[in-house]
Image (tube, rainbow, N blue to C red):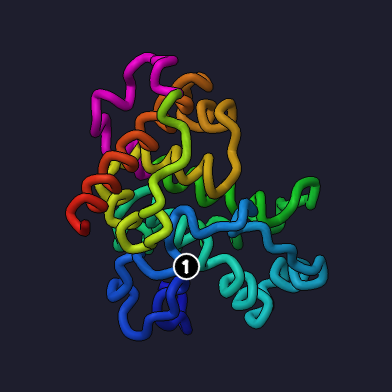
Amino acid sequence: MVAGWRGCPCCGLSGRWASCDGFGPCCILWDVDGRSPFAIELPAALLDRARRREPAACEEVCRVFEAPVYSLALRMLGDVDTALDVLQETLVKVFTRLPSFRGEAPFWGWVRRIAVNECLMHLRSRGREDPAAEAAFDADLLEHEGPLPPVAAEASRLAEALARVPARTRAVLWLYHVEGYTHEEIGALFGQSASFSKSQLARGTRRLRELLCEEEIRHV
């Protein structure tokens, strides 16, 4: 773990990172404004200092991106320890590859791509967790892409439901709704077509709706 970090980068909980289960108000899937949490512009001067490995500059880069990287990994992979591994691996690669960053695209997008690739490597290492993940696209599923029930506004219930969705489907939900990836981009990340992303999004939305409706009934 990077020296000097304290508490959960998403929720600010003190103590060991594992004390955060990812259900804090900053960790919830739909608690976003349509802009990627990674979309933070850093001054070119700061990046130049980080390239020279100035400690204060490197610490600032870590501080800015530790929360979005950790949140992305936690939601895509569903495990605190694995999310911490991805966070560490991502930051190591960011600083290792920083001299090769040419600034042709936003720095935050470059960091995000590294983090997403790390998450996908962990997903692939798990093998095929759900046969439905490889199922052919079913156009009828698109009817389930509508809005979630009103209970979705209650963050804790949404987070609990999201945790019960298969990891690959959950990853597609996060990349599409929070990070703003297109179906074509998500399909390419998984080595699939855009139809794969559409199917996973529809299945995930339908499953979340079912789980949230069950919760709503139990609390009536």
- The correct choice, above or below, for 119 with respect to 44 in the image is above
Looking at the picture, tell me which residue is in the foreground, 217 or 147: 217
**Residue at x 52%, y 32% (from the top left corner):** 186
**Outermost residue toward the left?**
218
Q: What's the amino acid at mark 1?
A: Cys
Task: Look at the image and give the residue range highlighted in magenta.
Answer: 122-142
Queried whether the magenta region covers residue 123, the answer comes back as: yes
* Crowding at mark 1 (Cα within 10 Å: few <14, some 14-19, many 20+): some
Q: Which residue occupies the foreground of this view, 129 or 52?
A: 129
Who's the residue at 33% across and 63% down the image?
156
Q: Is residue 81 magenta?
A: no
Could you say where residue 190 lies in the image, as x and y percent from the top left? 46, 29
Mark 1 lies on residue: 26
Q: Position of residue 116 (x, y in %)?
A: 50, 46
Relative to residue 177, is residue 33 drawn left or right?
right
Query: Which residue lies at the image location 43% right of the left edge and 83% below the top edge?
Result: 6
For the view shown, which residue lies furthest in the front direction? 220
**Quick check: 108 above or below 51?**
above
**In the rendered view, does 36 fall on the left or right side of 89?**
right
Percent from the top left, x then y, of residue 188? 54, 27
In the image, residue 105 lies at what x, y percent? 76, 47
